[in-house]
Image (spheres, rainbow, N blue to C red):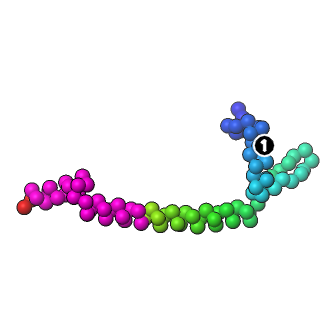
């Protein structure tokens, strides 16, 4: 059984892409080519992603608020209509 679900050439290709992106570096130890993670570029990528995550999270929160407002103001919305009908029956 192989330790990975992908072929060795596919692993090598992924490693080359990561190395060209500066996310890993390659060393040399006799016949081995150990790789190391490069913390600096990974931290920069994480900071960039975090900024956009916060922006999207705030946008989705605003959208949620707007949708709640619209559904409570729209008497044709099924949820609002049922609430109005219940109130009428209770009177």
- 47 above or below 78? below
User: Can residue 79 be seen by looking at this rendering?
Assistant: no
Q: Which picture quadrant has residue 86?
A: bottom left
Residue 51: image x %, image y %?
A: 58, 67
Give me the residue at 57% from left, 64% from top: 52
- 8 above or below 53? above
> Which residue is farthest right?
30
Q: Is residue 88 magenta?
A: yes
Which residue, given by chain and number where applicable, does mark 1 sit on?
Answer: 12
Residue 21: image x %, image y %?
A: 76, 55
Quadrant position of the N terminus in the picture: top right
Secondary element at tag 1? helix
Q: Which residues are magenta?
A: 62-89
For label 1, the crowd category at 10 Å Cα-Cα, with few meaning under 14, some 14 to 19 and many 20 or more, is few
User: Can residue 22 be seen by looking at this rendering?
Assistant: yes
Total residue callouts: 1
Give me the residue at 24% from left, 52% from top: 78
**57 on left or right of 37:** left
**66 on left or right of 87:** right
Between 46 and 73, which is closer to the camera in this rendering? 73
Give me the residue at 52% from left, 66% from top: 55
Between 74 and 62, which is closer to the camera in this rendering? 74
Q: For the stretch drawn in magenta, what is the main secondary structure?
A: helix
Give me the residue at 70% from left, 37% from top: 6
Between 68 and 3, which is closer to the camera in this rendering? 68
Between 31 and 19, which is closer to the camera in this rendering? 19
Quadrant position of the C terminus in the picture: bottom left
Q: Is residue 67 magenta?
A: yes
**70 on left or right of 6:** left
């Amino acid at each position: 059984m192989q330790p990975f679900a992908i072929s060795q050439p596919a692993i090598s290709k992924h490693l080359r892409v990561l190395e060209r992106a500066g996310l890993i570096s390659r060393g040399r130890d006799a016949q081995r080519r150990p790789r190391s993670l490069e913390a600096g570029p990974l931290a920069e990528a994480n900071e960039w992603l975090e900024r956009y995550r916060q922006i999207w999270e705030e946008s989705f929160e605003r959208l949620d608020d707007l949708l709640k407002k619209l559904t409570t103001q729209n008497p044709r919305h099924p949820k609002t209509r049922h609430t109005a009908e219940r109130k009428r029956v209770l009177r």
